[in-house]
Amino acid sequence: MTHSLPSPDDLAEVAEVTAAIRESIGSVLSGLDSAITATLATVLAGGHLLMEDVPGVGKTTLARAFAASVDCSVGRIQFTPDLMPADVTGVSIFRSDDHRFEFRPGPIFAQVVIADEINRASPKTQSALLEAMQERAVTVDGVTRPLPEPFLVVATQNPIDMEGTYPLPEAQRDRFMAQVSVGYPQPRDEMAMLDSHDGVDPLEAVRAVTDTATLARLIDTARRIYAAPAVKQHIVDLVTQTRSDSSLRLGASPRASLRLLAAAKARAAMAGRNHVLPDDVKALAGAVLSHRLVPSTEARLAGRSTQDVVRTIVERTAVPTEARDAAPRMATAGASAAGA
């Protein structure tokens, strides 16, 4: 299946809107360029985002700032140990006056869903998100109900060694396109935060800079970015390396290859290019692959994280010559392929 390449106007719109969203988020949180880039790439690629870090570093604030920057419906779920699946998906209530059941939709029926501290809930409740994230639909009492489009889950979680957390199953982690870590701010950024948060909530000043119709167009533009065969081969080489690396007990799935390609296309669109470069793949490989991997016992004992392993794999995996040398000609080649 072939698609026409995005026009210069399409790419200009992506660059303009993502820059506005970046500025909007930056007015609330500073010093998070890489996390914001991964967030925007995930959104444009139609994926879901997982943010893991210690409490208090701005995970939920980043998610809320993004949601406030887009004129869309927002659902927020605070995951707790006693949260039930029905609290997420909704429940059917019997109406005695007309003797029928009425479905009351849960907070999952929103375009942007903030799942706060997702790994504090039991695995049963966590699994309630699986169908929604994969199928864009929810089945309750045998009835399947579609979710609004576009649909994005932004989940935060605390490190699994913290009190009261349940590890996310591998199948659920694989549903997230990317995982980012906010990290502690630099002193200058923390000083700026003290100034901007002094006596006010900066989120109250955030205004929507785009709407869901525009966001849908941006997602369509990102999907039509051209990726040369050599770039796709580089993605396959990286993912294949994770399946044979002795530091990993579980490598990346084929879904990871698809998601890395989609994220790389989104990054290229944000840069105003109609073709993917190897640098797009390298920049997002850690965010897209690391949370899908399971380290070996030896790697854990040595203190090596999956992020460390992915970084090593990216550094040692050679980029095909065709991907480097043919980069300036990718757009022309893509146009030919699209018109074939």
Image (cartoon, grey):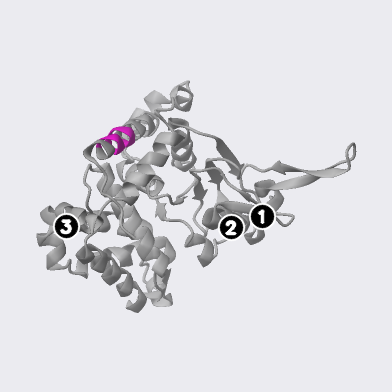
| Quarter of the image with the N terminus in it | bottom left
Judged by its main secondary structure, the magenta piece is helix
> Residue flagged by tag 3: what amino acid is it?
Ala
**Residue 183 seen in the current view:** no
Mark 3 neighbour density, 10 Å: few (under 14) some (14–19) many (20 or more): some
In screen coordinates, is 84 left or right of 296?
right
**5 with respect to 61 (left or right):** left
The x, y position of residue 94, in whole percent, is 84, 44
Residue 18 in which image quadrant = top left
Q: Residue furthest left?
A: 325
Name the residue beneath numbered marker 3: 333
Residue positioned 28% across, 48% down in the render: 267
Q: Indicate left or right for 303 with 136 as reference.
A: left
Q: CA distance from mark 3 to mark 2?
A: 38 Å
Amino acid beneath label 1: Thr
What residue sits right under mark 1 in the picture?
139
Q: Are marks 3 and 2 in contact (CB under 8 Å)?
A: no
Decide which of 102, 313 is in the foreground and name it: 102
Q: How many marks?
A: 3
Residue with the mark numbered 2: 131
Q: Secondary structure at mark 1?
A: strand
| Residue 326: image location, x then y, percent | 12, 60
Amino acid on which the number 2 mark rests in the picture: Glu
Write the residue at 23% across / 55% down. 339
Instruction: Give the mark toward the camera: 3 or 2.
Output: 3
Q: Which class describes the residues within 10 Å of circle 1: few (<14), some (14-19), or many (20+)?
A: some
Q: Is residue 165 positioned above or below 273 on the image?
A: below
* Residue 153 on the magenta segment: no
Going from the N terminus, do you reach mark 3 or mark 2 first? 2
Whether label 2 touches label 1, CB < 8 Å: yes
Q: Secondary structure at mark 2?
A: helix
